[in-house]
Amino acid sequence: MTTLEVKLDLPESLAKEAQQAGLLTPQAVETMLRERLRTQRVAELREAVKQMVSAGGVPMTMEEIEAEIQAYRKERRRASGA
C-alpha cells in the first residue's frame, strides 16, 4: 500500500458537500480512481477498435485474442528460460 498526501484546492461548497457525502475517505477515493481508470481503459480500447475498423482491419475474435495472449506468454516463458 502506498500513502499519498495530496493537497486539493476546491471550492468550499464542493469540499463541504463531498465531505458530507463521504467522498473524501480513502475508500471512496480509491473506488472513484478505480472506476475512472476502468472507464479510461474502456474508452482507449473502443478508440483502438474504431481506428482499426476505419483502417480497413477486421476486429479480432475473442478466440483470436486469447490465442495471441497464450502465444505471447509462451514466448515470454521460453525467453526467460522457464
Image (cartoon, helix red, strand yellow):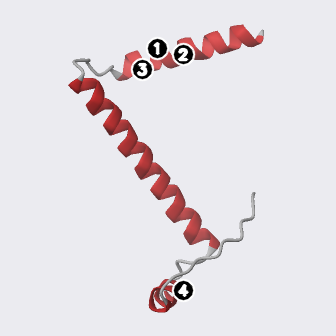
Q: Tell me which amino acid carries mark 3.
A: Ile
Residue beneath disc 3: 65
Task: Quickly name the residue at label 2.
Answer: 70
Element marked by disc 4: helix
Q: Quadrant of the C terminus?
A: top right
> Which residue is at a point 61% across and 17% down the rendered structure image?
73
Mark 4, other Cα within 10 Å: few <14 / some 14–19 / many ≥20: few
How far across and down, in percent of the image, does residue 76 sit?
66, 14
Q: Which mark is in front, 2 or 4?
A: 4
Residue type, label 1 = Ala
- Image-based side of 62 in relation to 11, left or right: left
Q: Pointer 1: what residue?
A: 67
Left or right? Give the position of 66 relative to 26.
left
Q: Dot 2, crowdedness within 10 Å: few (<14), some or many (≥20)?
A: few
Identity of the residue drawn at 33% across and 19% down: 60
Label at residue 14: none
Which SS class for mark 2?
Answer: helix
The CA distance from mark 1 to mark 3 is 5 Å
Residue position marked by numbered label 4 in the rendering: 19
Classify residue 54 as left or right of residue 3.
left
Of the numbered discs 4 and 3, the one sitting upstream in the chain is 4
Marks 1 and 2 close (CB-CB < 8 Å): yes
